[in-house]
Image (cartoon, coloured by chain):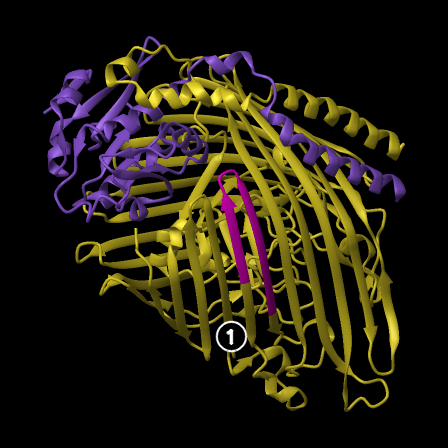
Chain colours: A purple, B yellow
Amino acid sequence: MKQRHKIGVCWIALCIGLLPPLCGPQSAHAQQISEYQVKAAYLYSFTKFVEWPAGTFANTADPIRMCILNDRSFVAQLIQIVGSKQIAGHPVLVILVQDGRQSRGCQELFISSSQSQETLQIMDSLRGTSVLTVGETNDFVAQGGIINFIVQDNHVQFQVNQKAASQAGLRMSSQLLSVAKRVFK
Amino acid sequence: MEISSLRLVRTLSLPLLIFMMGAGTSCTAQQPAADLSEASLEQLGNIPVYSASMHLQPSGEAPSSVTVITSDEIQEHGYRTLADILRTVRSFYVTYDRNYSSLGVRGFARPGDYNTRILLLVDGHRMNDDVYDEAMIGTEFPIDVEMIQRVEIIRGPVSSLYGSNALFAVINVITRQAQNVSGLELSGESASFNTYKGRISYGHELGQFKFLVSGSFYGSRGQNQLFYPEFDSPLTNNGIASHADDDQLGTALATLSSQDFTVQASYGTREKGIPTGAYGTIFNNAATRTTDSHGYGDARYDHTFAGNWELMARLFLDRYTYEGTYMYPSPLDPTQASPNLDFADGEWWGSQVQVTKTVLRRNRVTAGVEYRDNIRQNQSNYNVNPYSLELSDQRSSSIAGIYFQDEVPITKSLALNVGIRYDHYRDVAASTDPRVAIVYRPVSKTNLKLIYGKAFRIPNVYERYYSAFPNLPNPALSPEKLGSTEFVWEQGLSDRLWFSTSAFHIDASDLISQQSVNNGLLIYSNLQNVESNGIEMELKGRLPHGFEGIASYSFQEAKDRDSKQFLNDSPRHLGKLELVQPLLQRKLFASLDAQYRSGMTTFTGGSVSSFPIVNFDLFGQKIGRHLDLSVSLYNLLDKTYFDPPSTGVPEASIQQDGRTFRVKMTWHFGERR
């Protein structure tokens, strides 16, 4: 009985003691940039080169909602990138969404490869909205997605589906289209 | 012996923790990431990156057979309880003895067990209690179904990650968060048998803080009259149990989160009248009833550090109580009723630390340690008048587990997933449970999986020490063990149509079952060695304008290996159908769900026949912006059907409800996303 309690106390002490030292020494990997950090930076940058239809924002205090479908840890990475930045006066809000119905209120939605089986369902429920959909699977454009990431030789590039963008009432700047690896019209 | 093994676990976990501390990366390491936001599109395209695996796996890649049910489906189909949700899942079936709901999976449901072979989690928090190991799924489930965001179901043994109880399935219920509610939400419903329910929820985001509180009350008078032919005699009200089927549930849930921290508190209490005259109680006495209450607090920290280190740490405290009132003829005056009171009081706390790291490109390694301290596992029983103490049993125990999992990509299309967990117990033998899965994706839209896993369940204190008449204790019970081999083939037939099938073979040995010994006394023993073989097939489709459908069929044959007899409470055929058609620009949804269960034998030697059940629901959303309305009809065809009895229930079979209805309104005051 006594032994058991000692272990319990020891355990708590370890768990509590564990948290602060995590801001400790730097790991070798820290200076490298991961694929998803770059993707997060792209997601943030895209919003500067896309125009949403008039009436999307009531005023500049309305936030731009960058949504991530069902991926907590990617949300954390995106928040690191976005911080408290503003785009054209709009605050940027990173939101974790769990289904198509919630995604309808987003300005931008990222569907990671882990959620790709949901893509069609999401696309169906986004019909009639102006959400900039961003994906990272081979068939994302064919499924009606707007921007798709591709990784080539350790570099992250993207494709643009201009037809889907105009159906959603989004205007893409020529700068964005010129950097895109491929534009589907 | 016992101390030295515990020391071993501690010695193993200490280096792990130190390893984790040393590997944690600096807070300033996030700096380069922040600078990325200033990079131009061209610059971003020129940054060399290292690949990392993403975090949640798609079910296609998951090394198991997985089903996910979302809050949309729950609303559209009008599911009232977790049991309603689970009975639509392929190869699952639910039976109800008018007190608790029992879940069968792949042909396994043992009478007298309380879903002990299913592990139930809420947001990753273990819900099986420390006295009965019960996974409560009916109205006794302490979370309001309307607060569920989604339910994730993993079929097959996963003891390699979760330890005891994860034999046939792991069910993880994910609750709604502040951003899913945003503002005030009020809901009210009314249903057959004088059933009413009300809920109030409020979610708000304040900077980094998100909080959600919700409370609900459910009350049902139940069927005014239930007829049980076994009691059809003038002495027992001609078999009619009158006003004895009432059901009350209260729940409260609060979740507060700020960035990586989440704190959750939950409490649910349910009281149910037992109309069946169970355990030899006086038939048609409405005072016979049970109350189950489960509350917990759970604090969790999740963080992804630079360099793809993911950490999850959790600390929790649970309390579970049960009180049963059973009315028996008084020994002093047999014309009078006198209660026998039955109690369980469980309290446990625990903690878990898990770290995940992606190494060598996409090789994902997870290691974790878990400790649970069952502070109280008490059971008692006494007769009130004249007072006699039948049982007073105080126990405590502890569990320490350590686990490891590695997801190894071998080639682009082939991946291996290996996991192992070691659990140490104070008073039963330690257990080591491995799991191996091979996932092969030869071409896009084709997933082939071969999975082997072992699992175990330790006998609970109820099975070992409950000894109020007519039960005998059996402290010498040993753990039951299970091995399962499964082959899964998932095939996309087009972008909108998926077919999946799986074949499984399960071997369970030393299954703990209740048996009758001399003079009708009951005892739990390691009785059966069982084998189950089966196949499952599922077709899932979605049309461009939103029509969705899932149809599944499963065939399973569960047999006692020694007697070669088919198992009771085990249907050989199960069929499920779910259809949803959106109407009026997705403002209205018409949905239909149907379940077929073939006949099965019961443990008393009788049988129940096959039946189809059809339910229909109309769900209108955003009527005048703020209102959701749903009208549901359950058992549309008014089919008369029966479930098998549980042990202690004197009837040969238990008739279920005929056609019933429910009307539900939900008002969303806040902005809806």
Region rendered in magenta: B252-270
Name the side, left or right, on which B671 lies relative to B485.
Answer: left
Q: Quadrant of the N terminus of chain B?
A: top right
Res B659 seen here? no
Task: Give the residue type that dot 1 points to.
Answer: Gly
Tell me residue B201's x, y (percent).
44, 62
Q: Is residue B103 above or below residue B251?
A: above
Res A113 seen here? yes
Q: In this view, does B222 lie above or below B372?
A: below
Tell me residue A80's x, y (percent).
42, 29
Give the residue number, with chain letter if any, for mark 1. B219
Q: Nearer the viewer, residue B649 or B628?
A: B628
Q: What residue do we see at 84% from left, 39% from top?
A: A6
Name the side, left or right, on which B304 lies relative to B340.
Answer: left
Name the side, left or right, on which B2 lies relative to A48.
Answer: right
Q: In this view, does B238 lie above or below B39?
A: below
Q: Does residue B253 show up magenta in the picture?
A: yes
Q: What residue do we see at 67% from left, 81% from top?
A: B287
- Where, by quadrant of the figure, is residue B51 drawn? top left
Q: Which of B562 and B322 is in front in this view?
A: B322
